[in-house]
Image (tube, coloured by chain):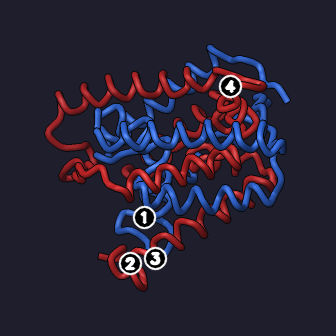
Chain colours: A blue, B red
Amino acid sequence: MTTPFTPLLSLGGGFLIGLAATLYMALHGRIVGMTGIVGGIIPPVAADWRLRLAFVIGAIVAPMAFAALGGRIAFAVPVSSVMLALGGFIVGIGANLGSGCTSGHGVCGMARLSPRSIAATATFMAAAFVTVFVVRHVVGL
Amino acid sequence: MLKTLSAGLIGAIFGLGIALSGMINPGKVLNFFDVFGTWDPSLILVMGGALVTAAIGYRLVFARRETPVFDAAFSLPTNRKIDGRLIGGSAAFGIGWGIAGFCPGGAIPALGLGYVQTFIFVGALVAGIATARWLNSPGGVRARQ
């Protein structure tokens, strides 16, 4: 299954993600790392759980509202439910042990030139490229 | 109240960015990683655009403010150590991302689109985070402090 190259939408969307990271730092003094934010609303909850929950609700409602107002959002899941569950569980363990994911390390940490985030981002990007190669071209799923 | 509301609005900007950029779409994310197949380079622009914006934004924030608007101090990660836990955890994260096509920042906004597959991934994600925390700190004691 191919997907079209969307340079303007992707760049514009990326700008919004960076803008959200900037505003969260300016107003709340925190990194926009989705794994950490979600982790803080899973019991035992963090002290600032209200802030985290508000962020998560906003992040869920925005695409919902955009779609409800007639905006088109491309969405396709080319993998099985077993792979989603397996991948989700591994992502949860890995992002927790590695202290971050694409948003926390890849955007916020890299923007601060954190050596830990640069090492983490290089590692998870490389691992994802290798995994997709193995799954699609070696195993052939 | 204003504090919590502003976090919700910033979450909405983030979620809209994830949706418009294509990060919300596992098919597109997996195609970015499939260089030798149906490659779609769009995600370079998502990460590049987000990174450059945040790098400039953070610089402006730290140059102009001693403290954030709604808090007494900036809460920035202070750990500087590159260890096996960071690299091993990140490698596992990349493997899971390559298997499912979702990362947490893509999947949470995708919940708003209402597809059952997203709920399967997020349920497993939450179980994974809880499991890692349980393995690390018995009874979640450390997480509570």
Give the residue at mark 4. Answer: B35
Placement of the N terminus of chain A among the 4 image quadrants: top right
Residue in the foreground of this view, choosing between A113 and B55: A113
Give the residue at mark 1. Answer: A49
Q: Position of residue A19 (x, y in %)?
A: 43, 29
Residue at point 61%, 36% (across, down):
A129
Give the residue at mark 2. Answer: B137
Q: As drawn, which residue projects farthest toward the bottom?
A: B139
Q: As drawn, which residue projects farthest toward the left?
A: B66
Callout 1 environment at 10 Å: few (<14), some (14 to 19), or many (20+)? some
Q: In the picture, residue B54 is in which quadrant?
A: top left
Q: Relative to A42, is A130 above or below?
A: above
Give the residue at mark 3. Answer: B135
Say which amino acid is labelled 1. Trp
Q: Chain of mark 1?
A: A
User: Element type at marker 4?
Assistant: loop
Residue at point 72%, 30% (across, down):
B31
* First reached walking from the N terminus: tag 2 or tag 4: 4
User: Element type at marker 1?
Assistant: helix
Residue in the foreground of this view, choosing between B114 and B106: B106
Q: In the picture, residue A132 is in which quadrant?
A: top right
Q: Chain of mark 4?
A: B
Q: CA distance from mark 3 to mark 2?
A: 6 Å
Q: CA distance from mark 1 to mark 2?
A: 19 Å
* First reached walking from the N terminus: tag 3 or tag 4: 4
Q: Nearer the viewer, mark 1 or mark 2?
A: 2
Residue in the foreground of this view, choosing between A99 and B15: A99
Do discs 3 and 2 belong to a common subunit?
A: yes
In the image: residue A21, left or right of residue B20: left
Q: Nearer the viewer, mark 4 or mark 1?
A: 4
Q: CA distance from mark 3 to mark 1?
A: 22 Å
Q: Nearer the viewer, mark 3 or mark 1?
A: 3
